[in-house]
Amino acid sequence: MSLKREGKLTSSTDHLRDTQAARPPRTSNWLAFVSFAAVIAAQAYAILTSPADADMGHLQKIMYVHVPAAWMTFLSFFVVLVFSVRYLWRRQENDDLIAASAAEVGATFNGLTLMLGMIWGRPAWGVWWVWDARLTSTLVLFLIFVGYLALRAFTEDAQQKAQWSAAVGAIGALNVPIVYMSVKWWRTLHQPPSSPETLDPAYTLGLRINAIAMLLVLIYFIRRRYEIARLERAVEHMAEAAAMGGG
Amino acid sequence: MDASNITFIIAAYTVTWIVLLGYLLRLVRKGGRARADYERMAQQRSGEKSQ
Amino acid sequence: MAWQDDWRRVRAIARKDVTTELRAKAGFNSVASLGVTILVLLGLALGPDAEALRNAAVGAVWLATLFSGVLAFNRSFQVELESGALEPLLLYPGPRWTIFAGKLLGNLIFLTLMVAIVVPAGVVLFGVQIPARWPSLLGVLALGVVGLVVLGTFYASMASRSRAREVLLPLLLFPMLVPVLLAATTASKALLGADVMHEAGAWIRLLVAYDLVFLTATFIAFEHVIEA
């Protein structure tokens, strides 16, 4: 629980009024069941129906989890960007909490993407890691996410946390295409790029179904994380109000 | 070749489920704690007001 | 004239920062010494093969600059924070961006002086042969340093006011600097060699674009960062 610095009492009471007016919503559990059931069904469908790939054999099946995880990573970071900019624009506390929730969930998917990429790379290329544009920029993206979350963890004041992380989120997102481009040039000027993820049309249906299922999980995770953040924030505001009223 | 590939496929799906369920567990725990804190605080507040 | 007042403010902040750092001497000397120490360690770790050292020279110089530069950025806000001078600075009349511009200019001067020590040290220690096109090498160096200073100053304005600033600043800054590191090292290597593929020009354009994009973005974002 953080203590507001003196001189910011007006803004903290404003926040207080907001959160007391809207009581944090109760967590909805149906989306959890639906999304996880969808992932199980989608994976079962994809594994059972996909034929062995001409080059890769059954290894291609890793793509059903790897590619959707990568898409969810980029989608989360896009959410962070949008809500960071929106926070700086409107200064609504909830926008900050959505951005933070998306960042945490995105970092999780980002880590998963990297691990799956390595598990794919070992049998497919014979090495765990290649300094390819896609892999390297995904790794850099992960590090930017980690920095964003560390900044939030190491900042006490709610307003500082919100404004700083919004700036870091927006500027970090701005950097992602530049990182991708620079790593791509760096590689292609010396060695031909490796592009293993060319997909047979037979796989696209399975891939799409898996992506939709993963999207449901992503939405559930971000919503749930956001509800928790709202609850925690409400507790902080109540503690501040108690300290002010009682002291 | 194919037999070892199966190992990697199993590893990939196992990792996926560990991460998904692990994060879900984290959310459930964190959510439970936050909810409990919230209820306790709300009760305290209403107690103070009625006095 | 309004812009002249702004410019005076920028200069005043920069001059104050540079003079306090240089007068204290401990600040500049220790940061520059650290840069050289990192170079020595890298030389020991990568050597003693002369050819291998020459190939690693550019990367080593850049890493030494990054690691020692990070310390300088945190210091630039620390002085105000410890003396409680940041709040009066914010209450001063005039636009907020001048504070950022002043800090930026101060750090730029500080880092230029540091690079003036680290780069010759790297040239000597790693046995680099200076090519005829050394002015363009200096250009690459300058563009890289600008990118480093822009983001370093911006992130330091937050990290220096948080807990665990020593870890937080490099953690935030280094991933952001990946394009600078790639562009500056690859362009420098190309210029040190024959640049057969004519790639240096493309990298220099990337550096210019990077500097402009983040100079604009950080000036816009600084208003939100400093008021919190």
Image (tube, coloured by chain):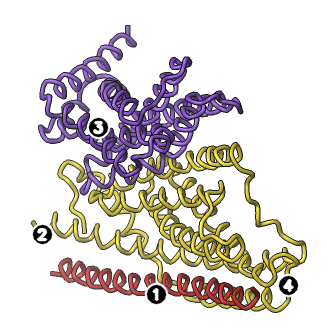
Chain colours: A yellow, B red, C purple
The residue labelled by disc 4 is A52
- Secondary structure category for the residue under label 1: helix
Q: CA distance from mark 3 to mark 2?
A: 57 Å
The residue under label 2 is which amino acid type?
Answer: Gly
Identify the chain of the residue marked 2, using the numbered disc in the image. Answer: A
Q: Nearer the viewer, mark 1 or mark 2?
A: 1
Residue A106: image tag: none
Q: Are marks 1 and 2 in contact (CB under 8 Å)?
A: no
Density class for disc 1 (Cα within 10 Å; few <14, some 14-19, many ≥20) is: few
Q: Residue at the left extreme? A: A247
Image quadrant occupied by the N terminus of chain B: bottom right
User: Where in the figure is residue A218, as x and y percent of width and height?
Assistant: 60, 74
- Secondary structure category for the residue under label 4: loop
The residue labelled by disc 2 is A246
The residue under label 4 is which amino acid type?
Answer: Ala
The residue labelled by disc 1 is B25
Q: CA distance from mark 3 to mark 4?
A: 56 Å
- Secondary structure category for the residue under label 2: helix
Identify the chain of the residue marked 1, using the numbered disc in the image. Answer: B
The residue under label 3 is which amino acid type?
Answer: Val
Identify the chain of the residue marked 3, using the numbered disc in the image. Answer: C
Is label 1 on the same chain as label 2? no
